[in-house]
Image: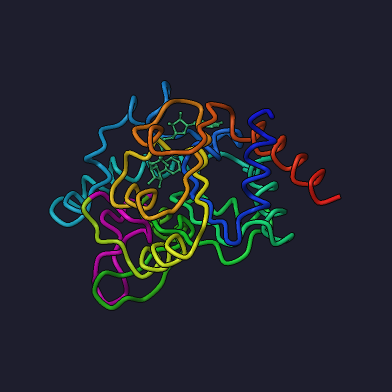
Amino acid sequence: MNMAEKIAKMITESKKVSVLTGAGISTESGIPDFRSPGGLWQKFDPSLLSADMLQNDPKNFYRRGLQVLEQINAVKDVKPNKGHYVLANLQKEGKIHCIITQNVDGLHTKAGARDVIEVHGSLDKGFCVVCGKKYSFSHITSLVKEGKIPPLCSCGGLLRPDVVLFGDMLGPHYARAIAEVRKSNLLMVVGSSLEVAPVNHLPDLSSKLVIINREPTLFDRDAVLVWHQQAGKALSQIYDQVQKIAK
Ligand code: NAD
């Protein structure tokens, strides 16, 4: 059996399957990841995206850190790719039960996936750290472009993007992700270096782990199957095999 056949067999034989995705699933849509060669961490200092920077030096966060988030948001007319569509289809067909993502790009939902658990938030939203009033991310960036740095709420509080920054606590979405993975018989990780904590604790909670990633990860030795492959290609082949098994 080839790798696609093996993974398809595991998916169809598992009662509950969860999927955890990372920036690697969206590189085929043109959005750079953080850690690959040419990724965002080769151009930017990760400390720019920290809760500490936002709190203690908000002007610097908005002058420099915001540029990193804008790189993710900058791809014009960004569209989901084959990988996002395969996962959405597998979910619709009841073959996978839960999609957890570290991504903030919203592409799983755009591809038709339902109830995606966005453990690191979403780049289309923002809020006031004082009164909690919600704002769109584009409103925040337009204030910054007008030179209103840092951007402020009508109450005078600091506005921030609704994404998890380094040093932020993870919210209720992460608790849900933990519960879903614990209930699953299989966790399939797609396109993540698994270097970001605490999300990289999820593989330890799964009874069976499959990893699809272009490069090796620290968790490869814990997985029952590891496929070093492009996400779109791997997921398309897996989908074809799942359809064959279903016939
Ligand atoms: P990461 O950059 O640490 O790792 C990405 C992994 O994906 C790498 O190991 C790389 O080898 C692999 N990869 C890249 N392209 C691939 C492809 N086409 N097919 C298969 N594998 C591929 O990203 P991460 O693990 O998600 O963690 C870092 C953080 O990056 C997350 O918190 C996420 O919020 C943030 N991020 C998100 C986006 C986005 O929303 N699209 C983009 C950049 C960073």
Image-quadrant location for residue 229:
top right
Q: Residue at x 71, y 37 (%)?
A: 236
**Identity of the residue drawn at 38% across and 61% down:** 162
For this orientation, the residue located farthest to the top is 37
Q: Position of residue 218 (x, y in %)?
A: 34, 33
Q: Main secondary structure of the magenta part?
A: loop
* Front-most of residues 78 and 24: 24
165 falls in the magenta region: yes
Q: Is residue 183 magenta?
A: no
Q: Is 15 displayed left or right of 82 in the figure?
A: left
* Ligand 1 shown in quarter: top left
Q: Quadrant of residue 71?
A: top left
> Who's the residue at 62% across and 43% down the image?
78
Give the extent of the magenta segment.
Answer: 145-166
Position of 223 with respect to 55 (left or right) is right
- Furthest-right residue in this view: 247
The quadrant the N terminus occupies is top right
In the shown orientation, is residue 227 left or right of residue 134?
right
Q: Residue sitting at 46 percent across and 59 percent down?
A: 118
Query: How are the residues colored?
Result: rainbow
Residue 202: percent from the left, percent from the top?
37, 53
Viewer-proximal residue, 114 or 34? 114
Where's residue 123, x and y in %? 45, 55
Image x and y of residue 193, in percent: 39, 35
How many numbered dots are placed on residues in this image? 0
